Image (cartoon, rainbow, N blue to C red):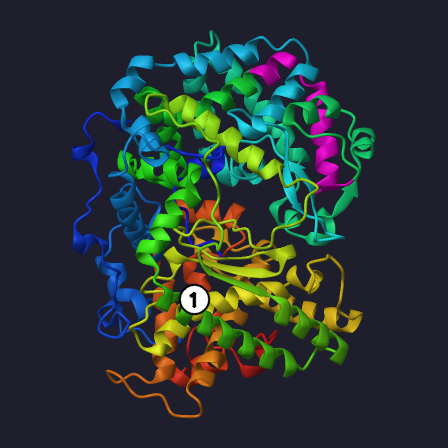
Amino acid sequence: MKRFLLLSAASLALAGSAVWAHSDEAPQAQSAPADAASLKPLRFGSWGVDLGARDISVRPGDDFDRYANGSWFRRTEIPADQASAGVDYDVYNLTQRQLSALVISAPASGQVGGLYQSFMDEARIEALGAKPLMADIAQVEAIRDKAEMARFMGRSQGAFGASIVGGEPYADTADPTVNVLWLGQGGIGLPDREYYLSDDFKTQRDAYRAYIVRTMKLIGNAAPERAADAIMAFETEIARASWAIADRRDLGKINNPMSSAELAAYAPGLDWDAWFAGAGIAAQKRIIVNEKSALRDIAAVYARTPLGTIKLWQMFHVANNAAPYLPKAFVDNRFEFAKAMSGVSEQRPRWKRGLTLVDGSLGELVGETYARQYFPPSAKAKMEALVANLKLAMGDRIRGNSWMAPATKEAALAKLEKMDVMVGHPDKWRDYRGLKIDPADLYGNVQRSAAFEYAYALSELNQPVDRKKWSMNPQEVNAYNGGLENKIVFPAAILQAPYFSESVDDAVNYGAIGAVIGHEITHGFDDQGRKIDANGAVRDWWTKEDAARFETQARRFGAQYATYEAAPGAFINPDLTMGENIADLAGLEVAYDAYHRSLGGKEAPVIDGLTGDQRFFLAFAQAWRDKARDDAIRQQVASDEHSPARWRIIGPLRNVDGWYKAFGVTADAKYYLKPEDRTRIW
């Protein structure tokens, strides 16, 4: 359940190495505020809703986002170093302050303190200049043929650099108890193929080319303009061959098993033996090839492109991925592009970028301390009780469903029963002792960390799936459904107010974190989750009649979203966002049912003139309040499966009968839907 863009748009578009950035000539001057008050949990009012954020001059049915958050919108300015402002950033920034208290005080002799110290040592970084990078650039310059380049691309899986394909182990679609290699398209630096092909993104495309020119100058290229044109032409061809993002989320389309030999025969434009050798992967009997035709066509683009062009492309991406760990000239150059992409006008403070590096490199090592300090056992117990109640409510919805055949309902209930729940943090923590951290070697630290992470992932290839493994750190403000692992995961950091608190009104917890829990549960039954059975295997366990009725409702629901203009000229793509939109609606409905179940048949008390149902829906809307820059919204609409926050409020609510009753929404309201026009999937 992705909440927001933590970093700049360019960070997301150009991330190649798995980690980020930090220096300590004068850490006292740049340290995060770590006084006791700044580390306290956030709180809305005395019982969990920010009554002062509302604009009660707006009718709830005309714009519930404005009704719940309008006064907050008027008084809120987006910080210069953020793409948006809202609850997500509030909780994220609190978590950053909490982490800073742990990381900044860590001794430089340890891994956490040593990594942070290496990033904060700006004087040393400036003194070294581009020397660490140029050693890697020299490796690219020395490449003599495309087989060598294929090996280099394979090695870039755990290093600076780029590849036209990429992969990692994940559960097999046929046997979800074992990990096999999943392989997908790569090769572009902008967020999605449309950034190369659509006139809507000409400004961002021009900014990207200008960034390439500046980067090639920094690494000493004698003809940076010509190099940029060649790189852009190469990536544009790759973009044309690439699949659209809506197709890339379709399990039926991306599930294409092949052996290494079959892949080499199908996509002969790339020396696959060389690529796999560079990646440290032996010949495989079974690979899940995702964008099948794209891999073939991108390999053909590679085959017909001159080696000199591909070397320029590789040099640029090595420099781009390394830029956050290089002198100020590289960092500022990269940020110029970020500004053009997202509208952010100021870089995040260096201490925050340093925390991001530590978080990305030593996530569970930091997370173990974080969870112990900020997530008490009592919170875990309360959250687990909430999840259990949500699962019961989902079960009721499945049993009461009017469009599912009895056998399909039985299979759905079996999947729900087997769905594992993970709350707060892993039961078993990762061992980082094999990762060498040197407080005087930032560049080397990042390289070694990337290689360490890649080796950790690769160690699971053809091994049993560890269903207790976490894909998020405890300090991440997010949650997810494990897909083929049939599990839902809620890190400690999202289990803070105003999403969740042990001391607020139950209606608030159910409206805020309850809707998140419901969202993740129902991902197991959305347009893609319905293709995965209780054991995690990819198979169609619905009848044709069930599927037809589901798809009819899904199309009607999608038609609503197609009318939502998220930013001027940028309308939501219902094919791309369908799964998340369904999970938003069903999650809200399941949370609403679970809230009423928790009342045990009693009437909820009225608090500050608000009924329990009104408090529930207000908490839901305030948990999603967000004010974002238009450029960031446009990027999200083009490349993200999640609808922008405003439509994650309005879109589901107007389909929920209880919301109409709670606020007396009548037929003359802007977002009124007739009962027969409301989507009823779960």
Q: Is residue 169 above or below residue 455?
A: below
Q: Is residue 567 above or below residue 57?
A: above
In the image, what residue type sits under mark 1?
A: Ile
Percent position of residue 418, x then y: 63, 67
Q: Is residue 210 magenta?
A: no
Residue 288 vs residue 233, the one in the foreground = 288
Residue 562 vs residue 608, the one in the foreground = 608
Q: Residue at x 67, y 21 (%)?
A: 150
Q: Residue at x 54, y 71 (%)?
A: 586
Report whether residue 11 is seen: yes
Q: Is residue 140 above or below residue 638?
A: above
Q: Residue at x 56, y 55 (%)?
A: 468
Q: Secondary structure at mark 1?
A: helix
The residue most toward the bottom is 602
Percent position of residue 22, x then y: 32, 31
Residue 562 vs residue 592, the one in the foreground = 592
Q: Residues within 10 Å of mark 1 (few under 14, many from 20)?
A: many
Q: Residue at x 22, y 42 (%)?
A: 32
Q: Quadrant of the C terminus?
A: bottom right
> With 46 as the anchor, is 21 left or right in this view?
right
Number of marks drawn: 1
Q: Is residue 271 above or below residue 371?
A: above
Span of residues in magenta: 286-311
Q: Quadrant of residue 143?
A: top right
Percent position of residue 438, x then y: 37, 24
Residue identifier under label 1: 649
